[in-house]
Amino acid sequence: MSDLIPEPKIFACSQSETLATDIAKYFGSDLGKVITSHYSDGEFQPSFEESVRGSRVFLIGSTFPNSDHLMELLLMIDAAKRASARHITAVMPYFGWARQDRKDKPRVPIAAKLVAKMLETAGATRIITMDLHADQIQGFFEKPVDHLFASTIFLPYLRNLKLDNLTIASPDMGGSKRAYAYSKFLESDVVICYKQREKANIISHMELIGDVTGKNVVLADDMVDTAGTLATAADLMMERGALSVRAICTHAILSGNAYERIENSKLEELIVTDSIPLKRESKKIKVISCAKLFADVMISVNTNRSISSKFLM
């Protein structure tokens, strides 16, 4: 009887098939076969069509709403556990529900903590994700979390633009740490937008802290949802004398009227990753793939090698 450990296997959730295919190619493997049966009431059942017994399994799926995407990943983790997989790594390019990372008012859930517990209960033994909405979400897990940064792929792109008088901007106070990290590598100035919200996704007031006169500004954020903040910030900065305004946002949620806001705004370009597939193309949106970054980290995890070189920020 052979004592060889089976080769690692990579499977994709339906919402991330395109990205997973690219990751598998860089990894040097084919995607494993999964079929999903659907019931008329909307219930579904994923099924691995090959053995995973004793294997290290990578399950790739971003958990952006709707909740079916999270449920599909949980079901696949459970199926792998019950099929005797040796290790089950949930590869989540976008970790959904992360904006609910604390109680910001009475009688509300901490959804990010709940999702972490569900992933562990389902059977995940490791999490690989990118640009969490808040770094402390890693502490919600009792399993190892590899938290990657999209700066690894954004920084070379920004350097290649060769922008004079570059300034990095944070669209809110909470993103100032990210902006300062980018400015350190790019040796640039930093400005910060101060915004007040009426309610979620509705900005009542925005003010700019810092000078952007004669500057080429790059806004840095972890996600873009309705694009209201980016559009307002870009328009404000151009009014204050900026030469150009771009934005780098890891996760392109782009809900509601986001595409229209971006196309009608003063933004010259929005640079995003493919952690979430775009609903449609836009001449202002540039997509940079994160597939090689995830594949490199998965190879290192599989071979028990350090991944510290992937942490630029």
Image (cartoon, rainbow, N blue to C red):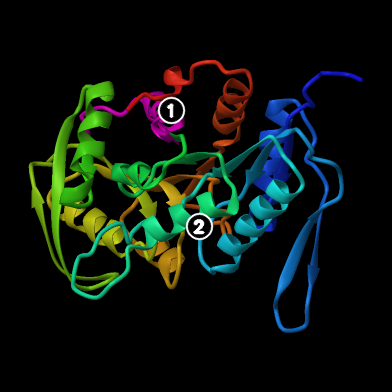
Residue type at numbered disc 2: Met
> Where does residue 135 sit, x and y in percent of width and height?
31, 42
Q: Identify the residue under disc 2.
A: 118
Quadrant into which the C terminus falls: top left
Q: Nearer the viewer, residue 63 or 186?
A: 63
Q: Name above or below for residue 151 compared with residue 247.
A: above
Residue type at numbered disc 1: Thr
Query: Of the residues tagged 1 and 2, which is closer to the observer?
Result: 2
* 106 sits left or right of 163 in the view: left
Q: Nearer the viewer, residue 185 or 283?
A: 185
> Where does residue 279 sit, x and y in percent of width and height?
58, 62
Quadrant into which the N terminus falls: top right
Magenta region includes residue 175: no
Mark sitting on residue 86? none
> Which residues, given as a range, are shown in magenta?
147-167
Magenta region includes residue 156: yes
Residues marked 1 and 2 touching at CB (< 8 Å): no
Q: Identify the residue under disc 1.
A: 152
